[in-house]
Image (spheres, grey):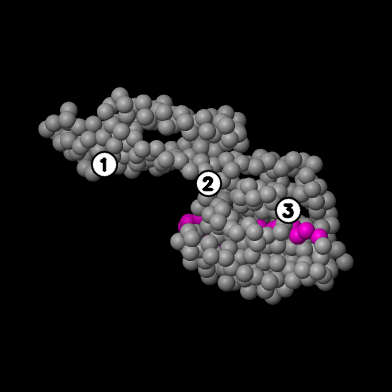
Amino acid sequence: MHVTSVDEHKLRTELVEEFCELVQVDSEPYEEAELAQVVEKKLLELGFEVERDDVGKKIGGNCGNLIARLPEAHCSHEKPILLCAHLDRVPPGFGVKPCLKGDRIVSSGDTVLGADDAAGLVAILAGMRIARRVQSVLPPLEVIITVCEEKGLQGSRHLDYSKLQSEMGFVFDAARPVGVVITGAPTHIKFEVDVIGRAAHAGINPEDGVSAMQTAAEAITHVPFGWVDENTTANIGLINGGEAMNIVCERVHLVGEVRSHDDEVAANVLKQFEECFVNEAAKSGATTKFEASTLYKSYYVEENSEAIQLLQNALSRIGRSMTLELSNGGTDANQFNAHGIESVGLGIGFEQAHSTRESITVEELVAAAKLASCLILRT
């Protein structure tokens, strides 16, 4: 028996049922405990040893990451591979009501569907069931189910990597068709700027004030937005400030980001942002406070790597061609690569992620599950 000879009708039915089950369990960032309990039970039923870490306490959430291993791997001299998906979904992610329309699963339209990343969870779970039917004793495997991926990859950022033995990983979490492999993703830097001016009555003595709002506005006209070059983007997405319309604005707080596949370019763009705000503050008499933090570092996996070769074989087995792409979004693969686990992101078929139009076809769910089973079996 091989994965390509499974009962297609039965597999499709099982996948739709499990997918709909998981997306109906509420699981926004920091609130993944209920879904974690459901997934942990399924992993245990599949023969995994499962532990939870304490990441939830570190990040203010109600749940940690799930770390699962096959007990038979203890007797193997092979290195395990790592499969990963995440528990959380972006808001509005409570009260999801999935609906099958033809071959496509959609939400009721007032929430996201949660295919990002329930499709990854289902692919790994179903892939394990298929692999168990094919072979009773499986190669070494580690499964990491992370929390708070949608908030700067916090689950994988705080994961204790000393617990892992894998040297290659596959992250089931890309809004691309099955067969697309994300071999690179950018460094992502978050920055925050405070512009501090001086308050005054806007209608009586505005000349005594220094407008933080105006200073910030002048700076914004000189900083890059959108595509800086073919590998770099920049944005300011949040602006807060002011007390009332009749007060010269004393303080403005801005939050932005820089993403780039080139760390040197990212650093230069970040410096440009800081200098623009400092210069405009000097002109107006305001002051600034600028802080930046790297949420995750870029990675790039070579085409001739062992992970890509294993994927090439697995995709060929299920009748899908492989397409290598770069992404400008981050996944847990960024964190795994930063800790020495050569990892790529895998397209698993969901579309219109992070919107109430999100959907996935049953065909893509089937392909993702078969891909997971081939990776588990290493065929």
Q: Position of residue 288 (x, y in %)?
A: 34, 35
Q: Residue at x 40, y 28 (%)?
A: 276
Q: Nearer the viewer, mark 2 or mark 1?
A: 2
The quadrant of the image that shows the N terminus is: bottom right
Q: Which residues are magenta?
A: 78-93
**One can see residue 104 in this view:** no
Q: CA distance from mark 3 to mark 2?
A: 22 Å
**Answer yes or no: do the residues labelled 3 and 1 have beta carbons within 8 Å?**
no
In primary-sequence order, the first of circles 3 and 1 is 3
For discs 3 and 2, the disc positioned in front in the rendered view = 3
Residue 151 colored in magenta in the image: no
Label the magenta part by its dominant secondary structure. loop
Q: Quick one: label 2 or label 1, which is nearer the N terminus?
A: 1
**Is residue 262 something that shows in the picture?**
yes
Q: Quadrant of the C terminus?
A: bottom right
Taking the image as shown, residue 88 lies to the left or right of residue 290, namely right
Disc 2: CA contacts within 10 A as few (<14), some (14-19) or many (>=20): some
Helix, strand or loop at label 1? It is: loop
Q: Nearer the viewer, residue 313 or 296?
A: 296
Residue type, label 3: Glu
Q: Which mark is residue 242?
A: 1
- 351, 1: nearer the viewer: 1
Q: Amino acid at mark 2?
A: Leu
Give the residue type that dot 1 points to. Gly
Tell me the CA gap for discs 2 and 1.
Answer: 29 Å
